[in-house]
Amino acid sequence: MGKGFKIGSIFGIDIRIDWSWLFIFLLVTWNLAFVFGQFHSDWSTVLRWSTALLASLLFFASVLAHEISHSLVARSQGLLVRSITLFLFGGVSSIESEPKSARNEFFMALVGPLTSFVVGFVLLLVAGGIAGPITGAMTNPEQVIGQLSPLATLLMWVGSVNIFVGIFNLLPGFPLDGGRIVRSIFWAITDNLRRSTRWAAGIGSFIAWMMIIGGIAMVFGVSLPFFGSGIGGLWLAFIGWFLNSAATQSYQQVVIKDLLEGVTVSRMMRSEPPTVSTRVSVSSLVNDHVMRSDDHAFPVMDDGRLVGIVTLEDIRSISKDAWDRTEVGQIMTPADDLEVVDPDEEASDALNKLARRDVRQLPVVSGGRLVGVLRRRDIIRWLQLHSELDVE
Ligand SMILES: [Zn+2]
């Protein structure tokens, strides 16, 4: 979800759009232009398309309002909100950390669907006001929709969609808002965030699988209440698949954070790692170091000081013929460009640095002296061992 671009900022929060959202935006607009045309055969093409485009934009604004409400409550609880990204099925607020208490999480989750309901009801009321008294609503709803003006049609659609967004987000599966509410209740009862997340994520996976099975059944002609049957079931199955991976992923994140809580870099770093000097040729680096260990990177030292790091990728960047006449100092990443960690730093912060820099290892430096190397695979191994030994 890193791809996308920034469109502006509201309340100091960056608003970003993921590429997948543009796709949905076009699909919704195109679909609406078609649907509006079915109910209003008297509308011109331009009117159909402009109403559809405006409806899509208002839908986009509604999803944004939903996310902003989450972010503002998060910020009022002292959490740092970095950005809001709109993507395929809605929005996601990038909030720096988990809520501090069950109570905080409860309100932070609840405010989103509430916002969608309020926006939805207000728009429906306005639409009703514009449309005025309607006769025959009970007997022939399609005819009634056909009588609505473009503005009333637009507001009616966006209003209903907001109600739907509110209801969908209240599904009790983590990481949807409803799942967060469920988790906050478990959390309040058990006082154990990890266990509560596991239960809430389990319910999330269950709901997701129901959607997948139901969606596929629809494709094969089974008629579900409210959803009907047909090829539209693919959408339901797709959303289910998406929810299932979100549930699994968010549970893993909580487990990792929880396992690494209070663990410092020094506990999982490799002490006294093999090092090389700047003047060594690349061929002896390969023969004397790379071939003799399972390390992928070697800190480069000069006079006892860390001056850089050399990795397999650096070696691969030059041709084999040049190995003899090239020195390590020429191909290494210099120390100034390196991110380093302190042995007393939290391992979870170090893991974030590894991910942010997209590197496999970080030199561990204390008082200007190299004391070890922290490798990504050491952290993964550590996590595997601890999640196997300590299942709760
Ligand atoms: Zn929400």
Image (tube, rainbow, N blue to C red):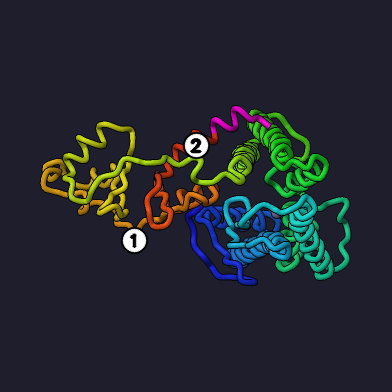
Report the amino acid beneath label 2: Ile
Residue 116 appears in which quarter of the rendering?
bottom right
Report the amino acid beneath label 1: Asp
Do we see residue 55 in this rendering?
A: no
Residue count near mark 1 (Cα–Cα under 10 Å), binned few <14, some 14–19, many ≥20: few
* Label 2 secondary element: helix
Residue 391 sits inside the magenta stretch: yes
Q: Identify the disc placed on residue 297.
A: none
Residue count near mark 2 (Cα–Cα under 10 Å), binned few <14, some 14–19, many ≥20: few
Q: Position of residue 226 (x, y in %)?
A: 77, 40
In this view of the protein, which residue sits in the foreground, 53 or 350? 350
The residue to which callout 1 is attached is 336
Q: Position of residue 143 (x, y in %)?
A: 79, 55
Q: CA distance from mark 2 to mark 1?
A: 27 Å
Q: Is residue 325 left or right of residue 72?
A: left
Residue range in magenta is 384-392
Q: Position of residue 96 (x, y in %)?
A: 61, 57
* Residue drawn at the location 57% of the way across and 54% of the way down: 87
Quadrant where the C terminus sits is top right
Q: Identify the disc placed on residue 380.
A: 2
